[in-house]
């Protein structure tokens, strides 16, 4: 409940008249919400089928739960595959075992990522899964394996898979949790990302957190469909890499005019071998700052080489019927960049939050 999606989702659920109580699983961070409907529960999806929950709390949860939203994940792109599997695969297996003991369970909504498509290219449909194209990082790989497990379990449990694309931030611009893309933008701002792999026309799929949380609420509570997979993504509204870099530069200049004086060029878009040669060179002879910068982006930006468009036809049809429309990335992206610049990437949250409200 303390992750990027969880923080936005729990308040939505708490405001619903048909939701009587929410057990909000936390791990290392405290849940900061104030609704009387929400009971924070300390646990750990890697702690076996009990999830590390005390027997007293476990009995109450098992007896009353009818909807589970599985939002726990290790999202570190640089993690080893074994590390990523502990949370993303074994954690899912543990939660499925816990769910099998819930006699009132009606829905198990598992959050995944559109990037289980790995190195595939072209159009990726919502029901697509199995492939042999490989993966860019351990996060994609381990989530793919988790989806295989979820599909195997659909005959025994009411499971739906909700694949999210990159959640950038709020439509107001606020970012509650920094992710790889935010760090990459900071590197560009500080002229520490001289090149990125990809093509001018490579697509970057970004969504607002309000849309992501609203869609998860919809498919978990309002229109749950067991055995289905949905893409919660930008789809045909994804930006090309060239356009994204242009928008970023425009926003830097608009919201920090002094940035113009530094005459920072846009990162060069290069092929993957060129980028990998650059990354190896930096590791061998680069200074510590540049080495750390490249380490941040090298585990996810190669995805841009494998350009693809995620089809969200079924997801969009269901959400539009309920009046949940997709915010325009052309409108909220500059606001997120503004918030990052004005808050110094979250170092001064109160000031930037007020300015962007």
Image (spheres, rainbow, N blue to C red):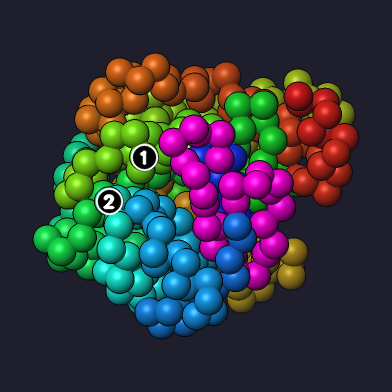
Q: Write the start and end of the magenta stretch as one range.
A: 14-38
Residue 275 seen in the current view: no
Q: Which residue is mark 2?
A: 106
Disc 1 from disc 2: Cα separation: 9 Å
Q: Quick check: 206 above or below 29?
A: above
Give x and y (percent) for residue 93.
Answer: 31, 73
Q: Is residue 111 rendered to the left or right of residue 31?
A: left
Q: Which residue is mark 1?
A: 221
Q: Quick check: 34 above or below 123?
A: below
Give x and y (percent) for residue 89.
Answer: 34, 72
Q: Is residue 36 rendered to the left or right of residue 323?
A: right
The residue positioned 71% from the left and 52% from the top of the image is 32
Q: Could you classify mark 2 by the number of other residues whose Cα lies within 10 Å: few (under 14), some (14-19), or many (20 or more)?
A: some
The mark nearer the N terminus, 1 or 2, is 2
Which dot marks residue 124? none
Occupied quadrant, residue 99: bottom left
Magenta stretch: residue 185 in it?
A: no
Q: Is residue 116 rendered to the left or right of residue 40?
A: left
Which secondary structure lies at badge 1?
helix
The residue positioned 77% from the left and 46% from the top of the image is 346
């Amino acid at each position: 409940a303390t992750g990027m999606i969880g923080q936005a989702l729990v308040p939505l659920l708490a405001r619903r008249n048909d939701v009587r109580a929410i057990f909000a699983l936390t791990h290392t961070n405290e849940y900061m919400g104030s609704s009387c409907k929400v009971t924070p529960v300390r646990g750990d999806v890697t702690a076996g089928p009990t999830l590390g929950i005390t027997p007293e709390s476990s009995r109450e949860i098992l007896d009353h739960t009818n909807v589970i939203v599985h939002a726990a994940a290790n999202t570190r792109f640089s993690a080893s595959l074994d590390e990523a599997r502990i949370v993303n695969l074994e954690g899912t297996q543990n939660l499925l075992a816990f769910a099998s003991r819930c006699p009132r369970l009606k829905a198990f909504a598992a959050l995944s990522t559109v990037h289980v498509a790995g190195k595939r290219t072209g159009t990726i449909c919502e029901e697509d899964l199995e492939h042999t194209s490989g993966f860019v990082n351990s996060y994609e790989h381990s989530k793919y394996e988790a989806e295989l497990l979820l599909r195997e379990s659909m005959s025994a449990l009411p499971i739906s898979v909700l694949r999210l694309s990159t959640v950038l931030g709020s439509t107001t611009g606020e970012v509650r949790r920094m992710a790889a893309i935010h760090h990459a933008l900071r590197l560009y701002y500080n002229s520490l990302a001289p090149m990125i792999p990809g093509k001018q026309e490579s697509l970057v799929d970004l969504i607002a957190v309000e849309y992501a949380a609203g869609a998860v609420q919809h498919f978990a509570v309002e229109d749950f469909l067991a055995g289905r997979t949905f893409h919660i993504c930008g789809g045909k509204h994804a930006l090309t890499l060239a356009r994204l870099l242009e928008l970023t530069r425009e926003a830097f200049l608009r919201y920090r005019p002094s940035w113009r004086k530094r005459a920072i060029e846009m990162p060069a878009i290069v092929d993957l071998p060129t980028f990998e040669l650059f990354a190896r060179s930096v590791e061998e002879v680069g200074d510590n700052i540049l080495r750390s910068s490249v380490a941040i982006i090298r585990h996810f930006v190669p995805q841009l080489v494998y350009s693809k468009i995620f089809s969200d036809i079924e997801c969009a049809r269901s959400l539009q019927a309920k009046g949940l429309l997709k915010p325009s990335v052309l409108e909220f992206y500059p606001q997120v960049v503004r918030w990052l610049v004005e808050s110094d990437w979250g170092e001064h949250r109160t000031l930037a939050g007020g300015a962007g409200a």
